[in-house]
Amino acid sequence: MLPADPEVRPHSLPVPDHDPLQIVVEGATSNLPDPEPAVAGPAAAKAAAAEPPAAEPPAAEPRGAEPRGAEPPGAEPPGAEPPGAEPAGGESAGGESAEQAEDTVVLAKTVRPRAPVGPEPGPAQAAPLPSWPQVLATTIRLWAQRRRRPPSAPGRRGRIIAVILVAILLVGGAITAALARKAASGRGQAGTSALGTVATVRRQAATWVARQVAADAIVACDPAMCSVLQGQGIAASRLLVLRSGNADPLGSDVVMATAAVRTQFGSRLASVYAPEVLASFGQGSARIVIRAVAPDGAVAYQAALRADLQARTLVGRQLLGNPRLHVSASARQQLAAGEVDSRLLTTLATLAALYPIDVAGFGGSSPQASAGVPLRSADISGAPGVGGTRSAASLASLKGFLLAQRAPYLPAEVNTVRLATGQAVLRVEFTAPSPLGLLGAGG
């Protein structure tokens, strides 16, 4: 040990401003700072203090050295002593003394840990577009918030107002388009409903003509109505097509007064060509009126109709006095008023001469027919003879007799029906229009 020199003053080692290097000796590490040579004298101490520390070259790993695993900063390797602690027994971590350590010193490179590797991001999915009400509400909310703040740049208020106006225009356009589509759909439905109504009325009128009009009668109609009539089984030879070039419906027995026909002939249709309504279907422009054509004009037809009514009234009252004809209360009134078709009156008189007949009632009045149009059907059955001396005729016998007749006394239909009272009767029905002058009085 050197003797104490009064001229040499103890000094303290400079503290490095960086982390101490880790010294690796045969796999063991120590955080002790590098020893510095003793500086003798104050002059040397001042020179050392004035001289800046030399930059140390970066530590390089030796070739063939195995790279260390990533360790977090500040973590000490396993088995390392804390900084400033001496190994127990004056030996290094490898069990050897410091003097016996190898001269080769390897400076360990600080390895930063790798950033954790997360799952790869998937493909970006497009967010659903907001609705127009949401866009408008968001735009107004942002505008209100910015109104409470001073504008940061000139013209900002104008841009906000422009954005709001664009949003309002877009929303208004969308609403207008939706309303237009709805209105168009409503018009389409209304048009479809109107066409369906016209088609329904045409079918009803065509069905009535096919069942009620005589098989040899000529029917006048516009092209569309004639097509529907053909669909109901009416032959084309029985159809008189009314086009714009046709002068009148004369030559036919019945005219189908559709909107086109009414427009074509106007008031002359009822006042000149066809004064009597046999039946009517529908309303408004879809209405179809089935009229009886007057071959000699409306005036002559009306005169013949009044004469026929007088003859029917006379014959009807005579039948009421026949004891072989049993008539219900309602049927008696109809006979006395001359409301029964002349063909029915002749048929009942003939049957009563052969069998006792019971008449339950008359019918066959067409919907919305003109006043005075005769009733063309009757419900009849056999009745017991006077004093019970003769049994009632069967329905089959009556039907056979009726179907054996010839026109104009051949019924259009003879069917067995059951009344509300439970009584079975034979329904006899003649075709339209009723012929005038068959009874000879005033004809």
Image (tube, rainbow, N blue to C red):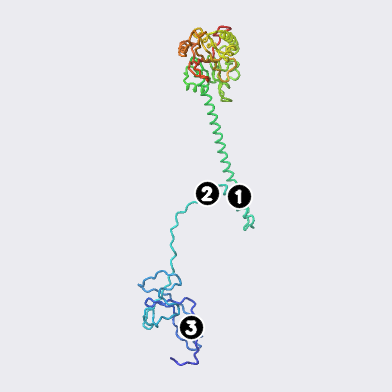
Of the two numbered discs 1 and 3 in the rendering, the one whose residue sits closer to the viewer: 3
**SS at mark 2 in the image:** loop
Residue tagged by mark 1? 164
Residue 260 seen in the figure: no
Marks 1 and 3 sit apart, C-alpha to C-alpha, by 74 Å
Q: Is residue 309 above or below residue 137?
A: above
Along the polypeptide, which appears first: circle 1 or circle 3? 3
Q: Which amino acid type corresponds to the residue marked 3 in the rendered image?
A: Leu
Residue tagged by mark 2? 129
Q: Position of residue 343 (x, y in %)?
A: 53, 11
Q: Position of residue 131 (x, y in %)?
A: 55, 47
Residue tagged by mark 3? 13
Of the two numbered discs 1 and 2 in the rendering, the one whose residue sits closer to the viewer: 2
Residue 423 seen in the figure: yes
Front-most of 193 and 315? 315
Q: Quadrant of residue 249?
A: top right
The quadrant the N terminus occupies is bottom left
**SS at mark 1 in the image:** helix
Along the polypeptide, which appears first: circle 1 or circle 2? 2
Contact check, label 3 and label 2, Cβ < 8 Å: no
Q: Which amino acid type corresponds to the residue marked 1 in the rendered image?
A: Ile
**SS at mark 3 in the image:** loop
Q: Which amino acid type corresponds to the residue marked 2 in the rendered image?
A: Leu
Q: Quadrant of residue 371?
A: top right
The quadrant the C terminus occupies is top right
